Amino acid sequence: MERNTRQRNAILGVITEVGRPLSTQEILVEGQAVVPSLSIATVYRTLKDLITEGWIVPVKLPGEADRYELTRLGKHYHFKCSSCSKVFDIHERIKNNNLPAPADFIVESYDLILYGRCSECVPKSGGTEPEAAKHLI
Amino acid sequence: MERNTRQRNAILGVITEVGRPLSTQEILVEGQAVVPSLSIATVYRTLKDLITEGWIVPVKLPGEADRYELTRLGKHYHFKCSSCSKVFDIHERIKNNNLPAPADFIVESYDLILYGRCSECVPKSGGTEPEAAKHLI
DNA sequence: ATGCTATTGATAAACTATTATCAATAGCGC
DNA sequence: GCGCTATTGATAATAGTTTATCAATAGCAT
C-alpha cells in the first residue's frame, strides 16, 4: 500500500467499527455505504493486502467462506447465530484441563465454535426454547 | 441403492474399518486397494447415497473439504494432526458450564476442533516440543 | 494545477470441490 | 447363461469463491 485511498479506509473502517467477523459480501455492502462505487474486486484485493500487512486475519468456520476481523483482537473463539448467520467473538477461554484428547496426542491449539441464537434473535421472554436448548448440547 | 456393488461395499467398508473421518481422496485411494477401477465420480455418488440413507455424515473442519464418517459414532469432536493431516475422533465432552458465551445468547450446540500432533507424529522422547507446546494454548 | 503511476471497477479467468452426462459394464432375477 | 437396467468410469459441466487483466480513475509529489 503506497496510497491512502477512500476504498481502503472504508474497508478497514468497516471491519474496525462493526466489531465482528465480516464476510466479503458484508464488507462490500457496508463499504458501499461509504464509497458507493466500491467493487468486490477491490474488497478482495484490499483484504489480501491488509492480511499481508498484518492488520486483519481470516476467520474460518466449518463449511463457510472466510470472514475477516482485526488481528489486534487476539486469539479467541466464535459464536454463529443460526438465525441471522452473524458471527460474534467469544473472548472467554476453556480451562486447559478440560480439553479432551488421547494421552499420547499433543494438543497445540484448539478452535471452539458455538452455535445458537444471538441476543437479537433470542425469542423474547415467554418462549420455551431457551432452557430446552441446553439439552441439545 | 438397488444393487449391491463391489464399489459401494468397498467405500462403506473403508470408512468403517479406518475408523476416522476420511477425505474423498483418502476414500478413493483406500477404495482402489479393494476395487482398482474405482473412480472419483463413484466415490462422490456413493457418499451422497450413503448420507441420504443415513449411514454416514460429513465432517466439516474450518477451511477444509468435507470428510466422512459413520453416523453411528454419534456426536463427538475432532483432532487434526498438523503433521500428517489425519483427523481423529474425540469422544470426551466439555463440561457444560465451561462453555463461554454472553449471558443473553442461547448456545444450542458447539464444535470443538483440537490441533496438534497425533501419536504417530509426536516427536519421540528427547525433543523439547511437547511441554513447550502447552503454552501455545 | 499537472503529471506520474498506484489503485480502482468491471469482468474474464482460474481454482477447487462437487455434480451431470452418457456409453460401457456388471448385478441380479429369471 | 441371458437380458434388463442400475451402476460405473471418464470426463465435461457446474457452482462458489478468489484472482488476474486492463483501461479508466484518482492519490500525491512537484
Image (spheres, coloured by chain):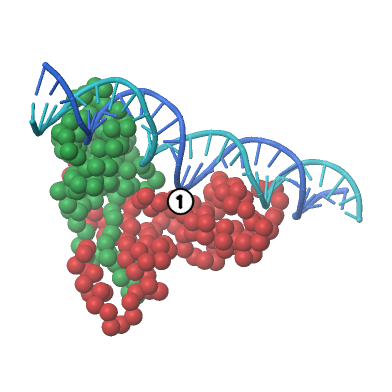
Chain colours: A green, B red, C blue, D cyan
Which quadrant would residue A129 be assigned to in this image? Answer: top left
The tally of labels here is: 1
User: Which of the pair A44/B37 is nearer the observer?
Assistant: A44
Image coordinates of residue A80 in percent, x first then y, are 29, 42
Image coordinates of residue A125 in percent, x first then y, are 22, 34
Q: Which residue is mark 1?
A: B66
- Using the image, name the chain to which the residue with label 1 belongs: B
Q: Is residue A9 left or right of residue A122?
A: left
Image coordinates of residue A104 in percent, x first then y, are 34, 75
Q: Is residue A127 visible?
A: no
Q: Is residue A92 visible?
A: yes
Residue in the picture at 25% in, 74% down: B129
Residue in the picture at 19% in, 48% down: A54
Image coordinates of residue A6 in percent, x first then y, are 17, 28
Which quadrant would residue B114 be assigned to in this image? Answer: bottom left
Question: Eyeballing the image, is A133 above or below C20?
Answer: below
